[in-house]
Every structure is written in structure tokens, then in C-alpha cells.
Image (cartoon, rainbow, N blue to C red):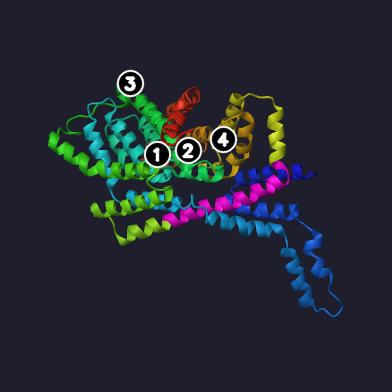
Amino acid sequence: MTDPQIALAMLGLFIMLVFLGFPIAFTLMAMGIGFGYYAYFDPSRQWRQYLRLDETATSWDSWSLWFDGFLNNRIFDLFINQTYTVMSNEVLTAVPLFLFMGYIVERANIVDRLFSTLNIASKRIPGSMGVAALITCALFATATGIVGAVVTLMGLLALPAMLKARYNPSFASGIICAGGTLGILIPPSIMLIVYAAASGVSIVRLYAGALLPGLILVGLYLLYVVGRSIIQPSAAPRPTKEEVPDIPMATMIRMIIVSFVPLAFLILAVLGSILFGLATPTEAAAIGALGGIVLAIAYRALTFQRLRESVYLTVRTTAMVCWLFVGSYVFSSVFSYLGGEQIISEFVSGLDITPLQFLLLAQLIIFLLGWPLEWSEIIIIFVPIFLPLLEIFGIDPLFFGILVALNLQTSFLTPPMAMSAYYLKGIAPAEVKLTHIFAGIMPFLLMVFIAMAIVYIFPGTVFHLPELFYGR
């Protein structure tokens, strides 16, 4: 076999092992080191000391020099260097700080206050409880960026309330599953930080570029919720006075100030400081982490146990992301050294396809990868394969990244591996079946595809704000 054929076999073997359930980060590292040992094997470098042994050498000398020779392969140098590169990456430093902010906010009992307030404030809107749940999901997802946490908490908080209000189980489930995924698109998004680190695109431009597409997707979700509530009132009955009582305007304003304003101010402060150049993403993330602690103290929700849980979950998730990067860098370096990227580039270039056809092909592949993989693996492992091809087709990496961020909403919503549905099913009442959840998700999947079409037809939705803030 030629080196490029071995590279393709390496990629195929990795995909097979992922489907078998092997840990992705350590599989990447093992395969990168294993195939890299072959790729960088140099007998003259590795065994020259061992071959110089004379007759007086002891068995210990033989084994020691043999082991030294075995380790004298450039793949181990590459592994160490890539590990250091990941750990010293300034962009990735923002990840643990944003995660910590999210976990602290999750435990500060802000979300239940926010949902209750929005439910009362929007009671005259068709599907008011669904609208309140969706807006709460969007704000909470934006603050945390952790899909599982948002879906689980909102499933415990909003789903029983909607079922009690006689909402269709599929409709209610779809709202929570779709709303919970918005945090991987709307800034400050951890997914966009990871894409910036993988692609070299400015994170501040990515944040600016993602704002309008994120709002478009939220708007489409809200239009669907309100529209279906009007067309099919039985899916979302209007609340009775017993369910949502009338309260004085002064009380309403006070509730909004107490529950909505602090979280919105925290998000706007973090995002605004990044977009207007007042702070780097890492500095803004530090502000967010501090703000999350202040909110938890203000709501009298900060205990040592909750603080310890937040730190533990932050460290665990950050370690996962970092080891994925280490494994991906080693794997992709060996894959490229063996000629894998070149053969893929030549194959795609030889297809004689248009930029639109390439975008459709790339997004279809990412959509299919979303079935067995989460967004982190797709961004870190597979998106870099497409990045060298963007220049060939004249596609801006910023535009491609926003399309990918929209597409990756589907990785949590597409059966049979819709993780958002499984998160919800794990805490939903027994009468809510998995088939109900899948059925409720389908219309929101359609909204994602419509949003992607809007972004492609009107690229100004991506480029307007980055050019306005930072120029071309």
C-alpha cells in the first residue's frame, strides 16, 4: 500500500472504532501515535546506538538501548509538542472560564425565576408558555453553552408545567430540545471558540458573524411556536387565570428586574466587551465567571457544595476538549504527512463541482456525522479536513463556520442519535415517549434548514456585523 492509501485506511479505521464506541480522544491519540510511528520510522536514527553494542554489553545494556531506540521516533516529539501547543493556546483559555460561568449560573436558581416571569409576561401571546420556555432556553443556553445542562434543567422545570397546562407532549418536548441547542450557535458560544482555534479565524469576527443567524433561528422557532398555537389551539391551550394569575404592573416590572435583567446584563457585558474590543475573549470569560459568582451570591445560592460541583464539571469538560485537540492534532498531522489531505483535495477538485455543490456536500457530510458524533468531535476532527478546500472554491472560512454552527444544531436533534431527545427522555414523565420527542423535534429541524438557506441566500447576515465593527 502507498502512504496515501494507508492514510485513508487510517481514517476509515478511526470511523469504524468510533461507531464501536471507543473513547474518541484516546482513540485519536493511539491511532496517531501508532500510524505516526510507521510514518516517521527511521532505522538509521532509531537503532544506530543499539547496533553499536559489542560483546561486553550486558543484557540490561541491550534492553536499555533497544528501548531508547524504540522511543527515538519523531512521533513522540510531535505528540509532546502538540500537547504543549494546545495547553498554551490563548483562545482555548476562554473555554474553562465560560464553562465555569455556565455551571455557576445553572446552580444559582435563576432559570426557574426567569421562566416564571416570562410565562406571566407573555400570557396573552398564543402559545405563551412555549414562548416563555423557548426564550428561557435561549438565554440559559447562551449563558452556559452546555446542551445537556439546558435540556435537563428546562425539562425538569418547564416540561411538567406545559404538560399540566394541557400542551401536546410532542410540541412541548420539541420546544425544549430545540431551545436547548441554541447555545452552540449564539455567542458567547464555546463551539465558536473551538472552531476559531481549529481554523485560525478571529473569534471576535465569528461572534459578530453568528449574532444575526442566531437571532434568525430563534425568530423562526418563535414563529413556528406562535403559528402552530394559532392554527392548532389544542396543542397549546391559553392559560387560565388559575394557572397564570393577573398581577399588578409594578409587581411585573419588579419580577422582570429581579429575574431577567441580571442574567441579560451579564451576557451583554461579556459579549459587548468582546465585540467592541474592550476585552479579549479570555478576559471577557473571566468577567463572566466572576459575574456568575456574584449572581449566585446575590441570589443566595452559592454554597461550597455547588462551587465544588461547578469546578469539577468545568475541569472535566475542559480536559475532554483539550485531549480531543491533542489527539486531533496528532492524528491530522500524521494523516497529512502520509498524503491523506492531498488525496482528498485532489479528489474533490477533480469532481468539477461548483462552490454551492461543495457547500452542500460538506454540510451533508457534517449533518450525517452528527448522528454518531457530538459537535466537539466534528469541529476538532473533521472540519479541518474541509478547511484547505475552502480556498479552492473561494469560500470564506468565517461564512463556512457559521453554516457549520447552524448545521450542528441538527447533531442534537436528528434521530436516531438525537442526544437532546435522550437528555429530555431521561428526566421526562413516563407518559412522554421517545417517539413523542422525536416527532416534536422534526419541525424545528426544518427551521434549521430554512435558516441555513437564508444565510446562504443573504450572506450579509454573516458579514454585515464583522465588517461594521472591524472592517473588511
Front in this rendered view, residue 250 or 154: 250
In the rendering, which numbered label is found on residue 366? 4
Residue labelled with disc 2: 412
Nearest to N terminus: mark 1 or mark 2 = 1
| Residue 25 in picture, x, y percent from top left | 58, 51
Mark 1 touching mark 3, by CB under 8 A?
no
In the rendering, which numbered label is found on residue 232? 3
Nearest to N terminus: mark 2 or mark 4 = 4
Q: Compared with residue 211, is residue 355 higher up or lower down, i.e. above or below?
A: above
Instruction: Specify whether residue 399 is painted magenta.
Output: no
* Residue 285 in sight in this render: yes
Query: Would residue 250 be found to the left or right of residue 69 on screen?
Result: left
The Cα–Cα distance between marks 4 and 1, rounded to whole angstroms, is: 20 Å
Query: Would residue 43 be found to the left or right of residue 219 on screen?
Result: right
Mark 2 touching mark 3, by CB under 8 A?
no
Q: Main secondary structure of the magenta part?
A: helix
The Cα–Cα distance between marks 3 and 4, rounded to whole angstroms, is: 34 Å
Nearest to N terminus: mark 4 or mark 1 = 1
What's the magenta region?
Answer: 313-340
Instruction: Report crowding for label 4: few under 14, some 14 to 19, many 20 or more residues within 10 A (C-alpha).
Output: many
Judge depth for marks 4 and 1 and give the one in front.
Answer: 4
Q: Compared with residue 132, is residue 336 higher up or lower down, i.e. above or below?
A: below
Judge depth for marks 2 and 4 and give the one in front.
Answer: 4
Question: Which residue type carries mark 4?
Answer: Ile
* Quadrant (top left/top right/bottom left/bottom right) for the N terminus: top right
In the rendered image, which quarter is residue 123 located in? Answer: top left
Mark 1 touching mark 2, by CB under 8 A?
yes
The Cα–Cα distance between marks 2 and 3, rounded to whole angstroms, is: 27 Å
Q: Residue at x 33, y 49 (%)?
A: 105
Instruction: Report crowding for label 2: few under 14, some 14 to 19, many 20 or more residues within 10 A (C-alpha).
Output: many
